[in-house]
Structure formats: C-alpha cells, structure tokens
Image: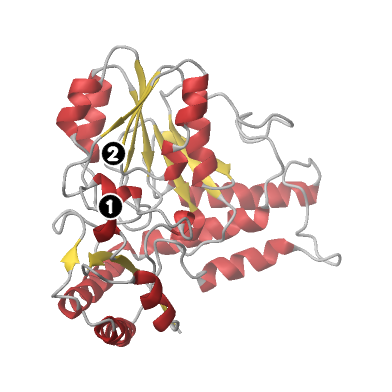
Amino acid sequence: MIYLDYQATTPLAPEAREAMLRWLGGPDSDTFGNPHSAHRMGRMAAAAVEAARGRVAALLPDDGKVIFTSGATEALNMVLQGTPGDVITFAAEHAAVLDCARVVEAQGRRFTVLPVLPDGRADLDALKAAITPATGLVAVMAVNNEIGVIHPLAEAITIAHAAGARVLVDAVQAIGRLALTPFRPDYIAVSAHKIHGPKGIGALWIAADAPRPAPLLWGGGQEASLRSGTLSPALCAGFGAAAQVAAEGIEAQMFHVKHLANIARDAFAGWEVNGSVDHRWPGNLNVRLDGLDVARLISDCRNVMFSAGSACASGSGRPSHVLKAIGLTDGQAKSSIRLGFGRYTAAQDIEVAASAILSAAKEQGL
C-alpha cells in the first residue's frame, strides 16, 4: 500500500510514538498522573507537558505563548469567535475558518470573504480595498491544504497591521515544513498530526503583545485560563517529539520532498497543475485531467492512497471550494486529484503510484 495523502494526515514518527508510550501509564507506573495535580506524579506529568510546549514553541516565533488545544480547528475557532471586530479572510481558506462566518455574524460582526488570484494566492489588492478601521482580524493561511500554494504572509501581515487589525495564520500545512519564525502575526494555529505527531492535539500561538481571545471552554482554567480541561501528557509529549524531529530535519526534508516533486511532476507532465507552480509547498501536487472520473480512479487504484481534495469535505459530492475559488469549472474541479508526500515517502512510491494512476486513467480513454 502506498500512502500519498500527507495533507490529510501523516504517519506517526517513531520518536513521537516512543515519547507517548511512557506517558500512557499503567497501574504499576508513575506516569499516569494528572499534570494539574500538585503531588510528585502530577509535577512529573506537568514537566513533560512543559518540555513538549518548549519543543513546539521552537518552531514558532520566539515572542509568544503556546496554548495546547485539541487541534487547529479549535485554535482557529477560539480566535475567530473570541476576538473583537470585523473579520476578513479569503475564499480558499479551510472550512475551519470559513464556517465560522455564521457565528461571527451572529455576534453582530461582519465576516468578509475576499477572492484569491487565479494561481490561488491571496489577493492583496482586494485586502487593501476591503480593510477598514472596524476590521479586528485578518485570517490567512500559510500554505493551502488542497493545492499547496504558499500565500504572501509577510505582505498580508504588513497590510493588516498598518490598518490596526490583528492577524490569524492557519499554519497547519506549514509548520515543520517551512520556517515560521521570520513572521510576526498575532495568532498561529497548528496541528500535531500533520507533522508526524498524534491526532487530537494542536496548539494556538499567541504573540506577547496580542490580546487574548475569549475562551471557548470554561472549567478549571487550565492553559492560562484559555482552554479548560485536563491535558494529556501522552499527546503533548508526542507533539513535542514530532516538533523536535521536524526542527532538526527541516532542511533535509525540503531536499527530499523537492526530489520527490520532480519525479511526480515528470510523471504527470501531460496534466494541468492547479495553483501556482512557483509559490507552493513541493510535497503537494494537485493536478487535473479534464474528463477524468476521479471516483472511479480512486476505486481502480485502491492500493494507492490519494485524494480528490480536502479529507474534511470528502464524500460531500460538491466540487472543491478551493478549486472553484481559482476559477475552475465544476467539471475541472471534479477531474482533479491531490498527491501528498513527505518524510517517509520513497521515490519508488511515487513511480509505482504514478504508473497505477496513469494506467487507470488510460482505461478511461484519457
């Protein structure tokens, strides 16, 4: 079986698994303590959480605080729902951002969705025209989860800050892959399972000078009173280990993924690439072949794990909102596939998978 769906999730790193096992804690161990307890076992668990927090923070700007959450969706919702002022975002953002429109508007705030350019990048001229003194927050992703396009973050942050607005960055597809430390937004949302960590944990980075959003959850006041609930030392430790491995190998990973991307691009040379060719994370290849029946293709290539779009929207039957945002027709959007690869993908995996996909497409007369 060949796995090419790295944008949906990534295989758990051995280092993350090992770190988690220690803190799962059986009845004969001393590692199952509640990290919010004052006794020795609790303090041990709390130390593991703080060590993990530091490792995650190392991938982010150095003048902020990391708050653990259940994932990036919760982190994004916390800021979008809990920060005052109108919201501006872009049409190719993740549903975790776009679907907050109804909640924001129910609070009496405007939620404006701006277009993206035909290459999928944020339309900065539209941002300049739309931003007003009432704008409290601009939400923009670092790397698009469906087409891999890298957005002009520095420029968007500059525009927003000049107008007095705060900036929320969805960095789920960027953390551990691209350097985030040069950027200075106000909030950054990340997820562990996209960097070979466990599912069920993510984080919100908050700049030192940014106002804290109102909590979504109320209870024991954990995580600086922003996110109540007992933390899992095992999940935190797994996230921390995955972050450390990513930080140590970011350059090697980029070199490896670029090599894989060259192989994949050559294999699908006759297909159209969706989104910018120059401004993209190389581990995401979203391509289309007009007339392709993607559902049949996935069925015929059952030993190759790839996607027709976002895993979050799979099975909906609707064309990708991201592909529609860059101007594709319904037919073109539904004739597109996404191949995602990374640290544990071998060159042979790309070659074998491409051969199977191209053969299956040929069986459709394409």
Q: Is residue 342 visible?
A: no
Q: Residues within 10 Å of mark 2 (few under 14, many from 20)?
A: few
Q: Please name the colour scheme applied to the rendered image.
A: secondary structure
Name the mark on residue 183.
2
Report whether 103 appears left or right of 353. Answer: right
| Label 2 element class | loop
**Residue drawn at x 15%, y 29% as measured from the top left:** 125
Q: Position of residue 127 (x, y in %)?
A: 22, 27
The quarter of the displayed image where residue 86 is located: top left
Q: CA distance from mark 2 to mark 1?
A: 27 Å
Name the mark on residue 19.
none
Whether pointer 2 and pointer 1 mark residues with C-beta atoms closer than 8 Å, the reply is: no
Q: Position of residue 126 (x, y in %)?
A: 19, 28
Q: Is residue 333 visible?
A: yes
Which residue type carries mark 1?
Answer: Leu
Report whether 205 appears left or right of 201. Answer: left
Q: Position of residue 266 (x, y in %)?
A: 15, 78
Vertical position of residue 151 compared to residue 332: above or below: above
Vertical position of residue 300 compared to residue 288: above or below: below
First-in-chain label (2 vs 1): 2
| Label 1 element class | helix
Which residue is identified by label 1? 323
Vertical position of residue 164 compared to residue 242: above or below: above
